[in-house]
């Protein structure tokens, strides 16, 4: 029995082990090593890649940017293991991040807990104003 492996940058196609049978044939058939390739990531609408190929060879480089990231371009290289370094991904702009980005604007030098109380008071004030407006017609009408 013989075991096979491929050099870095290559991937085994077929079985990693084969046996020499009595009739002189290898079973299963001998594998081959094919070059590793990186595929173009899909399903990321914010990701902009400079090239339009679907497959890339090891050490190929692409420029990529993220639509919401002021289009600042970064370089990524296809690694010998078939992944992109750095990864071709755009950070998701989730709700938490949006809130955190505006946190400083909200804070105005006031601790967040105090601000929360102030906002509650403001809300209460607006509610009272609304109630007063609703009551006026019956009071004076
Ligand atoms: C692939 O190779 C790159 C560069 O050597 C390395 O940073 C990354 O962690 C590797 N990824 C995996 C899944 O092995």
Image (cartoon, helix red, strand yellow):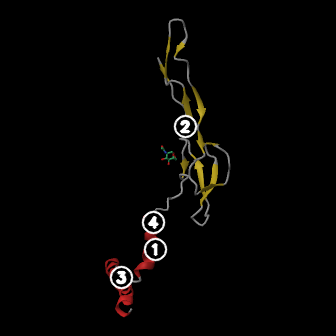
Residue 48: quadrant of the picture: bottom right
Q: Which residue is mark 3?
A: 127
Badge nearest the viewer, 3 or 4: 3
**Mark 3 or mark 2: which comes first in sequence?**
2
Q: Earlier in the sequence, mark 1 or mark 4?
A: 4
N-term mark: 1 or 2:
2
Near-viewer residue (136 or 2): 136
Query: Quarter of the image holding residue 31?
Result: top right
Mark 1–mark 3 distance (CA, rounded to whole Å): 25 Å
- Mark 1–mark 2 CB contact (< 8 Å): no
Q: Residue at x 46, y 71 (%)?
A: 101
Residue extending farthest top: 23
Residue 123: percent from left, percent from top: 36, 81
Residue 8 numbered tag: 2
Residue 107 position in % (x across, y down): 40, 80
Q: Are marks 1 and 3 in contact (CB under 8 Å)?
A: no
Residue at mark 1 to residue at mark 4: CA–CA distance: 9 Å
Mark 3 or mark 4: name the one nearer the start of the chain. 4
Q: Between marks 4 and 2, how big is the CA–CA gap?
A: 39 Å
27 or 123: which is nearer to us? 123
Mark 1 or mark 2, which is nearer to you? 1
The residue beneath circle 1 is 102
Q: In the picture shown, does residue 41 fall above or below 72?
A: above
Residue 15: give x, y in percent of width and height.
51, 24
Give the labeled residue for mark 4.
97
Question: Which residue corresponds to the image point at 68% horizontal and 51% vertical from the top-left?
Answer: 51
Q: Which quarter of the rendered picture does the C terminus lie within?
A: bottom left
Looking at the image, do the residues carrying marks 3 and 2 touch, with CB atoms under 8 Å apart? no
């Amino acid at each position: 029995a013989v075991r096979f492996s491929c050099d870095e940058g290559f991937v085994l196609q077929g079985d990693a082990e084969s046996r020499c049978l009595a009739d002189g044939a290898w079973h299963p058939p001998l594998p081959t090593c094919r070059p590793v390739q990186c595929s173009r990531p899909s399903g990321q609408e914010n990701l902009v890649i400079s090239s339009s190929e679907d497959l890339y060879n090891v050490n190929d480089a692409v420029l990529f940017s993220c639509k919401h990231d002021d289009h600042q371009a970064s370089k990524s290289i296809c690694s010998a293991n078939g992944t992109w370094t750095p990864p071709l991904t755009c950070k998701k702009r989730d709700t938490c991040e949006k809130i955190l980005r505006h946190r400083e604007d909200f804070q105005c030098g006031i601790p967040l807990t105090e601000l929360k109380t102030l906002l509650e008071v403001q809300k209460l004030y607006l509610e009272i104003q609304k109630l007063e407006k609703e009551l006026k017609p019956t009071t004076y009408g």
